[in-house]
Image (tube, helix red, strand yellow):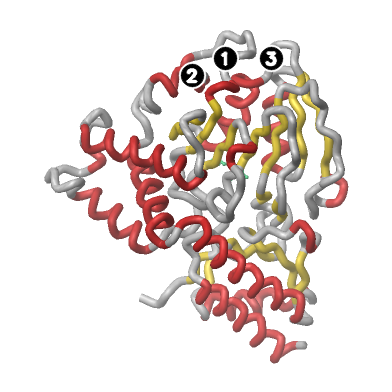
Amino acid sequence: MKQVHNFSAGPGILPQAVLEEASRACLNFDGLGLSLLEISHRSKNFERIMDESRALVKSLFNVDDAYEVLFLGGGASLQFAMVPLNLLRENGTAAYVNTGVWSTKAIKEARMLGHVDVIASSETDQFSYIPTDFTIPDTADYLHITSNNTIYGTQFQSFPDCQIPLVCDMSSDIFSRPLDASQFDLIYAGAQKNMGPAGTTMVMVKKSALGKTGRKLLSMMDYQVHIKGGSMYNTPPVFPIYVSYLTLSWLKAQGGISWIDELNQKKASLLYSEIDRNRLFKGTARPDSRSRMNVCFLLEPAHLEPEFDKLCKDAGISGIRGHRDVGGYRASLYNALPISSVQVLVDVMRHLESQFA
Ligand SMILES: *Cc1c(COP(=O)(O)O)cnc(C)c1O
C-alpha cells in the first residue's frame, strides 16, 4: 500500500505503533485471551490502564495532587456545559475570549446558565488572530479561553496572566508544547485531535475550584461525582481511553514534551516558510497568532485548486481541504505526523509553483 500522509484536522493521525498495539488488544488484551472490548471495566487489567492514563496526564503536565484527571464521554462539547455548571455561581459572571467556532459554542452554553462577559473577540476579522489586550474582570468566576483554534489556525502564543481561575479548551494542541499547567484551574481536551481517538475527553481540574457554585448538579454533570468514582462513576469509554493511554505512553517514551515541542516547531516552520516564500500560497492567520498545529492557507489563483488537489492526491497527501466554513487549505501537524510528511507537502507546493507561477 502506498504511504498516505494524514493531515486530517480531527479525528487526526495516531502513531502507527499505537494503532498496531490497539488492534492486538482488540483480539487479546494483556494476555487474557479476551478482547479489551469484552471485559469488565472493573477488571484489574483495565483499572491499571485507567490509573496509568490519569497518572500520565499529570506527569506530562507536571502537576501534583491538587489536580484530578478524568476521562469522560460526551466530547469536548459536553465540557462547554460542564464547565459553567461546575464553576459558575448562580448569580456569578464568567469571562470568555471568543477566538472561533468552538469558543462561540462554549459561550452559548455558558449563557444558558448565567451571565457571560465576552471580554475580547476576533470575530469581526474572521477570527484571524488572537486578541491580546483585554482586561480580565477580577470579579468573574473564571476566564475561559481556547488555546488553539482548529478551524482558523490560530493559537495563543502565551497565556494571559490571570488572577481568577483560568479554564482552557486545549482539544487541538494538548501536549504539543511546554506550558505551566499550574496556571490553569481546568484544562479539557477531546482526545481525537492530538491525544487519541474520538470517544473520550480528558478533563484535568484543580480540586479546590469545585463545589463553590451553590448549584444542584445532575450526577453525570458533576466533576466531584466523577472524581469520587475514580473516573468510573459509570462505564467509561474503555477503548478510546486505552488508545489515548497508548498515545500518551508513546509520547513519553519518545522524549515527552520537550521532544515533541522541537519537532512540532520544525514541522510548522518548514510549512510556514514555504507558504511565505511560494508565490502561489498565502497564509490566512496573522503571523503573530499562527498555530503550529493547524496551518491554514489559500492557493491563489484559486482556479489552480484542481491541479494542486491532483498533485496532492498523487503524492498520498490526505485531509488538507480547509474547514467547510472557511475554504482554502488546512494542514494539521499533530504530534504523530512525521516531518517527512510535511516535506512531501512542501515539495508538491514547489512543484506547482514551478509549473504555474
Ligand atoms: C474539535 C474541537 C471541539 C469539539 O470536540 P467534540 O469532541 O467534537 O465535542 C472543541 N474544541 C476544539 C478546540 C476542537 O478542536
| Type of amino acid under label 1 | Gly
**Most extreme residue toward the bottom, as rendered?**
354
The residue lying at 74 percent from left, 73 percent from top is 299
**Near-viewer residue (29 or 45):** 45
User: Badge 1 local density, few (<14 within 10 Å), some, or many (20+)?
Assistant: some
SS assignment at label 2: helix
| Image-quadrant location for residue 32 | top left
- Name the side, left or right, on which 354 lies relative to 5: right
Where does the C terminus fall, quadrant-wise?
A: bottom right
Mark 3 surroundings: few (<14), some (14-19) or many (≥20) residues within 10 A: many
Q: Earlier in the sequence, mark 1 or mark 2?
A: 1
Pointer 2: what residue?
224
User: Is residue 72 among what the camera can see?
Assistant: no
Residue type (three-letter) at the residue carrying disc 2: Gln
> Amino acid type of disc 3?
Arg
Quick check: can you spot residue 322?
Answer: yes
* Left-right relation of 317 to 80: left
Which SS class for mark 1? loop
Residues marked 1 and 3 touching at CB (< 8 Å): no
Up the image or down, 345 lies above or below 149; here it is: below
Residue 43: percent from left, percent from top: 21, 31
Q: Residue 262: percent from the left, percent from the top?
A: 56, 66
